Amino acid sequence: MFDRHTADNIFNMLVKFFDALYSKWRAKLIDMSSDGKNTMTGRHTGLVTHMIACTENPVLRIWCALHQMDLVITSATEELASGEWIMFA
């Protein structure tokens, strides 16, 4: 499909998909969820930023709760015993 998963490539693909699915989607989009990566949420070039710029109404940005939990759990397990697991027989 694309060589890289840049915000522009993802945006162009989503717009084509949404236009084919429902041409008035720009008036219906009310929120967007993302994983917090810069490609998704970048202030100037992120996907969410592009999507919000082309909508007709204010859009609520949501950082996916599952990704937030993954970051917390990953951090906690890395701190636990310096990242080493103890095997029990």
Image (tube, helix red, strand yellow):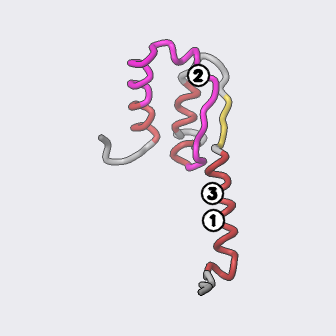
Q: Is residue 43 left or right of residue 4?
A: right
Q: Is residue 67 left or right of residue 1?
A: right
**Residue drawn at point x = 59 percent, y = 87 percent:** 89
The residue to which callout 1 is attached is 74
Q: Position of residue 37 (x, y in %)?
A: 56, 49
Q: Residues within 10 Å of mark 1 (few under 14, many from 20)?
A: few
Q: Residues within 10 Å of mark 2 (few under 14, many from 20)?
A: some
Identity of the amino acid at label 3? Asp
18 shown above or below 11: above
Is label 2 or label 3 in front? 3
Q: Position of residue 61 (x, y in %)?
A: 66, 35
Q: Is residue 26 magenta?
A: yes
16 shown above or below 41: above
Span colored in magenta: 14-37
Identity of the amino acid at label 1? Thr
Identity of the amino acid at label 2? Leu
